[in-house]
Image: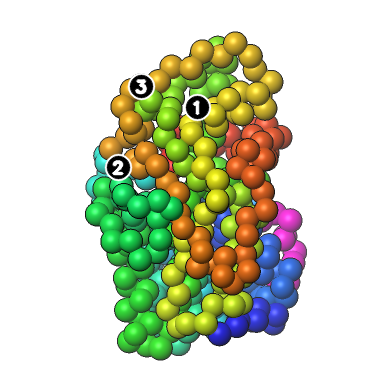
Amino acid sequence: MSVKFHGARVFVTGGAGFIGSHIVDRLIADGAQVTIYDNFSTGQESFVAHHAGDRQVSIVRADVLDLPRLVQAMAGHSFVFHLQANADVRGGIHHTRLDLEQNIIATWNVLDAMRQNGIKHLAFASSATVYGDPSVFPTPEDYKPVQTSLYGASKLAGEAMAETYCEYYGMTCYVFRFVSWIGERYTHGVIFDFMKKLRDNPGELEVLGDGLQRKSYLDVTDGVAGIFCAIDRAPDRKNLFNLGHDEVMNVMDLAAIVIAEMGLSGVKLRTTGGDRGWAGDSPFVHLDTKRIKSLGWRPATSIAQGIRNSVQYLLANPNVLARRPIGGV
């Protein structure tokens, strides 16, 4: 069920964000007409500034929680990428409505705006957090999870709504369960947190948990390639894919790469203890990617190189590092 984007009008929620802006770049390269729909609460002007004056791109500054505005802005498009979301897995611990509003209600708004406009194709950014604390590694798409975070639960709810709208209204959806993405325009997560801490105190680094948590990280260039590979080659109307790396890395090894890339030495690492960084954190994330690999996709960038890419980007763009507080995935 191949989709061709040349000449198509494509709508990208969160299109000025880390992942969304890379999706926009790819769509423009493929010849699409793109509408970026973003309230710029976390999206950044600099990520889309190179498209200024480009007649292929229009920007709507609005919130996905504003349903009438969303319906109006989405009219005339044929494909929606829904990248907008709360990206702070920990945020729901202290703000229990956050994931309800930003992930569940926002996703319902997007789906219903599609229904009202007769739009039939959706790519939805879900998350590996839907698996909670799995007992099978690498974790396949058909693993039955028990939820451990409001963030993961909200993403699973978004998947279920997307599948239901496909059933009711003849839509086609591509749902992607992401590991943590890294690379150019990286704006939140463990590398970001470590660099902020080291900027403030280059002699010591606090590591949440015991530092032995093992995670899979994917460079944004590989992730975007995986999304477009699936959209081009996936055969079904309802498609679900894990999107992660073959490799995993523990947090202490990741910290060592960050420290070296920042040119620091003699940094004391101090762990907070326990096998996870916070309530709802998964100490081991490693996804089975056989399904998307069967379509011809493979990650090309090692985790170590992706980390170096992220550090170098943030060193070269200190305004991005300064913008957000410590926190995130």
Q: Residue at x 33, y 61 (%)?
A: 143
Tell me: residue 73, above or below residue 191: below
Figure quadrant of the C terminus: top left
| SS at badge 1 | helix
Tag 3: residue type? Answer: Thr
Q: What's the mark number on residue 272?
A: 3
Tag 1: residue type? Answer: Met
Q: Residue at x 55, y 51 (%)?
A: 245
Q: Are the residues tagged 1 and 2 within 8 Å (C-beta)?
A: no
> Residue 128 versus residue 327: which sits nearer the camera?
128
| SS at badge 3 | loop
- State the separation of the CA atoms marked 2 and 3: 16 Å
Instruction: Give the magenta part as a residue range.
Output: 48-57
| SS at badge 2 | loop
Q: Which residue is mark 2?
A: 280
Q: What's the mark number on residue 252?
A: 1
**Of marks 3 and 1, which one's residue comes earlier in the chain?**
1
| Residue density around tag 3, few if under 14, some if 14–19, many if 20 or more, within 10 Å | few
Q: Residue at x 61, y 49 (%)?
A: 219
